[in-house]
Amino acid sequence: MTPFTQEVIKIIQQIPSGKVMTYGQIAREAGNPRAARQVVRVLHSMSRKHNLPWHRVINAKGQLAIPNEEANWEQRTRLEEEDIEVSSAGRVNLKEYQWIPD
C-alpha cells in the first residue's frame, strides 16, 4: 500500500459523524491535490476492508456522486441518519456540514 493510500484511509476514518469531506479535499489533505480519482479508487476498493465511512465522502459540488441507484440511496440514508440534510437533488450544504481537519 502506498503512503498516499495509507493517508487517505487515515483521513477518511477520522471524518466525524454528521460531517462530510470531498474527494478533492481528502486528496489535498493526503498530499496530492490532483488525486481525487485515486480517493474514489481507495473508497471503492478498501471501504469494507478498513471499515471506512464511505458515505461521508461527496463531490466538490456537495453532491452524492455514486451513480448506482442502490448505493446512492444507501449513502443518502446513512447521511440523513447522522442528521445531515440531503436535498431532493442529492446535495449537501458544504458550508454547514463540511469537516475541515485541524
Image (tube, helix red, strand yellow):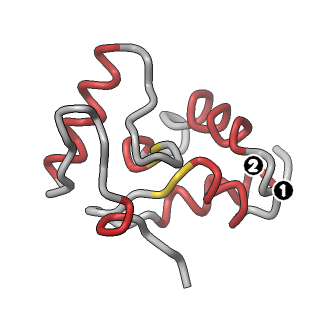
Query: The N terminus is located in which quarter?
Result: top right
**Where's residue 86, x and y in %?**
21, 44
Q: Work out which residue is located at the far top of the displayed protein and give it.
A: 69
The answer to which of 90 and 9 lies nearer the viewer is: 90
Task: Name, please, the residue furthest toward the right.
Answer: 2
What amino acid type should be assigned to the residue bearing mark 1?
Answer: Pro
Task: Where is residue 4? Give x, y as percent.
Answer: 80, 54
Judging by the rendered image, the residue that carries numbered circle 2 is 5
- Side (left or right) of 33 relative to 49: right
Classify 51 as above or below 67.
below
Residue 26 horizontal side relative to residue 60, left or right: right
Looking at the rendering, which quadrant does residue 43 occupy? top right
Amino acid under disc 2: Thr
Query: Disc 2 on helix, strand or loop?
Result: helix
Q: Residue at x 47, y 46 (%)?
A: 61
Q: Residue at x 39, y 50 (%)?
A: 56
At 73% from the left and 62% from the top, the residue drawn is 30
**Disc 1 packing (10 Å; few <14; some 14–19; many ≥20):** few
- Residue at which label 1 appears: 3
Across and down, in percent, residue 48 comes to: 48, 34
State the separation of the CA atoms marked 1 and 2.
5 Å
Q: Is residue 86 above or below residue 74?
A: below
